[in-house]
Image (tube, rainbow, N blue to C red):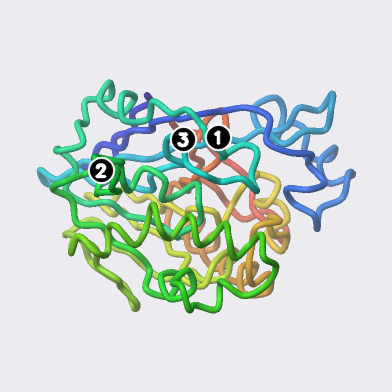
Amino acid sequence: MERIVLGEAEVLRVREWEGAFMPSADIVPGATPEDWERNADLLAPDHWNRADDTHLGALQSWVVRHGGRTVLVDTGVGHRRQRPHNRLFHERDSDFLDLLTAAGVRPEDVDVVVNTHLHADHVGWNTVERDGEWVPAFPNAVYYLPAADHASFAPDGPGRAGPATRQEERRLLYADSIEPVVRSGRAVLWTDGVRLDGALTLEPAPGHSPGSSVLRLDSRGERAVFVGDLLHSPLQLTRPECNSCFCEDPAQAATTRRSVLERAADQGELVVPAHFAGTGAAEVRREGSGFTVTRWAG
């Protein structure tokens, strides 16, 4: 667990897993081997294993405490979930709730859960299984789910189109991690932006998924932006036009990424991605046609 203080807000990082994720050519397919080598000082050793050309990533969540409330940003993969088409996620044993408790956050302490989007590694601990039924893991929390992603993942949503494997993967995901929260009455399906309190605001950031979003923190002039999966690798700072292999609308994702990074650089927002290994957050500035890290945090 790592801790960052921004104004009157405390930010905690809870890592579920960290390690080799996939070949670098696969995670950011638009980048070249020369891009990785040219940025080796930025990427190695925390984000890139140069020896075997493997991208290093993390499964993690962020906790924001502010104004007496506890906000959990994304909920990881979950425990023993059926994800047969993803070797890293399938039937994964996870002690996430124990890690969260060790950080001083019991499930009943969480007031707000933010799913920046509804991909499998961001919603898995939305629920737990009790007496054969999936129920909210955070019994006192309000869950904020992007309406556009919910519509896409729903049984008759456009996200269910395509290969049978994708349809099955999304059916399982919706059944165990999304629908139970909606059925419980604890979900808010939001569209145009939500102010959670005086310091925290949810805003649409589409492209990675239809409802992909960012959470902005502004406390006493100290700022951060939790960008979810707009970034998978620091390489995308130097090449913001390059998407990860998971972006559903590549053109929109690239436009959104550049816009979010431009604002972060101009307003001094700490950029907090969902999957950076090593040091998990960064201050950035403009450099050429891209951006570079001026300071790592967390």
**Residue 47 is drawn in which quadrant?**
top right
State the CA–CA distance, disc 2 to disc 3.
Answer: 15 Å
Please give the count of numbered marks on the rendered protein: 3
Residue at which label 2 appears: 137
Q: Quick one: label 1 or label 3, which is nearer the N terminus?
A: 1
Residue 242 image offset from top left, x and y in percent: 73, 59
Query: Which is nearer the eye, 253 or 146?
Result: 146
Q: Amino acid under label 1? A: Ala
Position of residue 20 relative to residue 158, above or below, is above
Q: Is residue 66 visible?
A: no
Give me the residue at 21% from left, 36% from top.
Answer: 107
Q: Are dots 1 and 3 in contact, CB under 8 Å? A: no
Residue at which label 3 appears: 80
State the CA–CA distance, disc 1 to disc 3.
Answer: 18 Å
Give me the residue at 39% from left, 25% from top.
Answer: 95
Residue 54 image offset from top left, x and y in percent: 77, 33
The quarter in which the N terminus is drawn is: top left
Position of residue 114 relative to residue 187, above or below, is above
The quarter in which the C terminus is drawn is: top left
Judged from the image, the secondary structure of the residue bearing numbered disc 2 is: loop
Residue at which label 1 appears: 58
